[in-house]
Image (tube, helix red, strand yellow):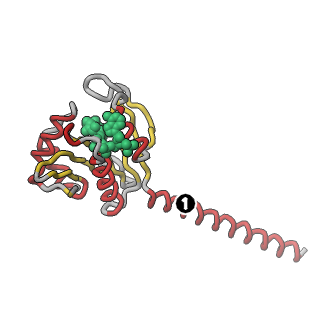
């Protein structure tokens, strides 16, 4: 498992063409590689690319850094060896450590049992919605999301900070009213 280089893009495209009906022009892989080089990971088996994950940052979200998995696939000959889970974990690590992303999302066909098992049960993504007729053939997609721990921890710290402030304000106003009471 390693980060992809520009030299891997043709092999990634080939793997995608063999595994999925959602295909992209080479320039789309190149755009990912130039914009987010840490977010392309490949499974390299003696020089042959047998799996890849292609991820990116959500360019529409302006107020928070969010990741998105564009595509994942592993050649049939190399499935059920843990490669997809490892590729996904490498993409998650890069999203958290390099980009400090708050979460990561993806779309998956509602009928894709293998991928759903991986996302829901192994990687702990949550279903956040259904996009009707998302795919060109009319199939619906589940919209899935995983929140990263660092961002959950940040959110908890924020709640704690707020609670402390509110308690501080309450204590302060209590003292004021006691002081006011003393004057009367
Ligand atoms: N049915 C049920 N569970 C499966 C299947 C299957 N056919 N294949 C793998 N799994 C399970 C594994 O048992 C494992 O779970 P476990 O740890 O509980 O045993 C888990 O999924 C992860 O297994 P990996 O070995 O890491 O997965 P693999 O390398 O086989 O790749 C993948 C899974 C990517 C879904 C592969 O089947 C594939 O390339 N499919 C075609 C392309 C595809 O569907 N890609 C995802 C589209 S969605 C997107 O790209 C955002």
List x then y, in percent, for residue 31. Answer: 17, 49
Which residue in the rendered view is the most extreme toward the top? 138
Q: How many marks?
A: 1
Closer-to-camera residue (46/41): 46
**Quarter of the image that includes the C terminus:** bottom right
Q: Which residue is mark 1?
A: 156
Residue 129 found in image quarter: top left
Residue name at image x 28 percent, y 51 percent:
87
Q: Can I make out residue 70 in this image?
A: no
Position of 165 with respect to 42 (left or right) is right
Mark 1 Cα shell of 10 Å, populated few (<14), some (14-19), many (≥20): few
List x then y, in percent, for residue 66. Answer: 36, 52
Q: Is mark 1 within 8 Å of ligand 1?
A: no
Looking at the image, is 180 positioned above or below residue 83?
A: below
List x then y, in percent, for residue 63. Answer: 40, 54
Q: Can I make out residue 83 in this image?
A: yes
Position of 156 with respect to 87 (left or right) is right
Looking at the image, is 178 positioned above or below residue 8?
A: below
Closer-to-camera residue (168/148): 148
What SS does tag 1 mark?
A: helix
**Quarter of the image that includes the N terminus:** bottom left
Which residue in the rendered view is the most extreme toward the right? 184
Looking at the image, is 85 positioned above or below residue 22?
A: below
List x then y, in percent, for residue 113. Answer: 36, 32
Closer-to-camera residue (92/29): 92
Residue name at image x 43 percent, y 46 percent:
124
Looking at the image, is 180 positioned above or below residue 77?
A: below
Residue name at image x 69 percent, y 66 percent:
167
Residue name at image x 26 percent, y 43 percent:
72
Image quarter for ligand 1 equals top left
């Amino acid at each position: 498992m390693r980060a992809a280089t520009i030299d891997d893009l043709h092999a990634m495209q080939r793997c995608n063409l063999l595994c999925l009906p959602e295909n992209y022009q080479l320039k789309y892989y190149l755009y990912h590689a130039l914009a987010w080089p840490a977010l392309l990971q490949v499974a390299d088996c003696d020089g042959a690319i047998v799996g890849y994950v292609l991820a990116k940052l959500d360019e529409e979200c302006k107020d928070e850094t969010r990741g998105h998995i564009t595509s994942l696939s592993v050649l049939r000959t190399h499935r059920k060896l843990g490669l997809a889970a490892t590729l996904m974990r490498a993409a998650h690590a890069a999203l958290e450590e390099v980009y400090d992303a708050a979460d990561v999302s993806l779309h998956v066909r509602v009928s894709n049992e293998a991928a759903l098992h991986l996302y829901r049960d192994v990687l702990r993504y949550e279903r956040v919605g259904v996009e009707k007729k998302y795919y060109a053939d009319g199939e619906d997609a589940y919209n899935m999301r995983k929140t990263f721990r660092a961002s959950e921890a940040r959110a908890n710290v924020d709640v704690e900070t707020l609670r402390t402030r509110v308690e501080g304000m309450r204590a302060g106003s209590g003292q004021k009213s006691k002081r006011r009471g003393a004057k009367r």
